[in-house]
Image (tube, rainbow, N blue to C red):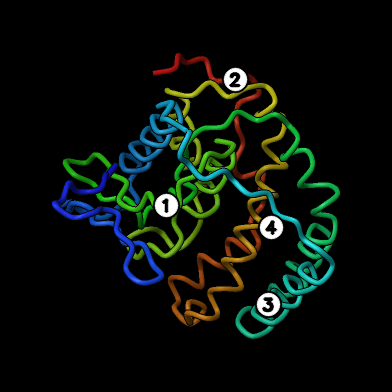
Amino acid sequence: MVTPLRLDSDNPAQVGDRVWVAYPWVDGRPYNGSTADIVAAGDLLGRIHAAQAPTADMPRFPWPDHDADSVEEDITGLQRVLGKHAPEIHDEVLARMAPWLESFMTETLPPVRDGGLPRAVVSMDFKANNLVYVDDEPVLIDPDNAEYAPRILDLALAALLFHNETATAPPRLFTGAEWAAFSSAYGRHVRLTAAELALWPTVLRYMLLEWGVWTLIDADEWDDWDDPHKRNFLVDLATVDLGRFPLPAEPYNSEFH
């Protein structure tokens, strides 16, 4: 992945209220949606999670603390954007999402937060639009959301949002076959624990409710629902059957690298 350039001046550098980082230009191509690109991306994510990078200076992942007002805000936001842009799925999505959102703090968050899940320095933004392929190998170009977090959350984010906002990707989430290719490549480097495998369905629901719902609502601000390519992805995200993304029943039989 990219690292900050060595400059005569500070890098990163604070300018006003913002901090800027200068990175090297990576001369390559975008993701093309091929099986080879998917496998290469899964392999890179596995290597990142297995790298055991230093953690002392990394931000710690913050667990959410929703109240009734924030839950209502999410439900109202979904009602608004789906009613405006995808009325054909409005009732179906709200019938599923609203109860999940209302029970998030009692049923979804606690097992993930308190499950003792292995942590690593992770991207928390591992998506196709943040990869540049050089000689068919991906380079992560936007590592600035990285945190010390449960690695399984990063894997779930990739499962749900890897194709988001990527013009060269299919206008949908991974298919079952694509996910099998991605997760198998990931498993070359990471041995998931029994706890991670057992909590995987709950982790997927967690990421759908936290990152997925925000993606669906925020897309309205950027007019993404009006773009046919982006709209197809958002509809797939809103209606996705989380069973599309299974993990093996046993920990991956692979060594750490």
Which residue position is annotated with label 2?
251
Which residue type carries mark 2? Pro
Circle 4 — which element?
A: helix
How far separated are the C-alphas under marks 4 and 2?
Answer: 26 Å
Write down the quadrant of residue 216 in the picture.
bottom right
Question: Cα distance, mark 1 to mark 4?
Answer: 18 Å
153 lies above or below 187: below
Marks 2 and 3, how far apart at CA: 40 Å
Badge 3 or badge 4: first in the primary sequence: 3
Q: Residue 22 appears at what percent x and percent y? A: 23, 56
Alpha-carbon neighbours of circle 4 within 10 Å: few (<14), some, or many (≥20)? some
Which is in the foreground here, disc 3 or disc 1? 1
- Please say if the residues under marks 3 and 4 sit with CB atoms less than 8 Å apart: no
Camera-near label (4 vs 2) is: 4
Residue highlighted by disc 1: 127
Percent position (x, y) of residue 37? 32, 43
Q: Which residue is nearer to you in this view: 39 or 124?
A: 124
Question: Label 2's element?
Answer: loop
Disc on the earlier residue, 2 or 3: 3
In this picture, residue 160 sits left or right of residue 169: right
Q: Is residue 245 above or below residue 222?
A: above
Nearer the N terminus, badge 2 or badge 1?
1
Amino acid type, callout 3: Glu
Query: In this rendering, which labeled residue sits more in front, label 2 or label 3?
Result: 2
Question: In the image shown, does 33 or 43 lie closer to the viewer?
Answer: 43
Q: CA distance from mark 2 to mark 1?
A: 24 Å
The crowding category of the residue bearing disc 3, from other C-alpha atoms within 10 Å (few below 14, some 14 to 19, many at least 20), is: few
Residue in the image at 43% along x and 26% along y: 52
Mark number displayed over residue 88: 3
Label 3 element class: helix
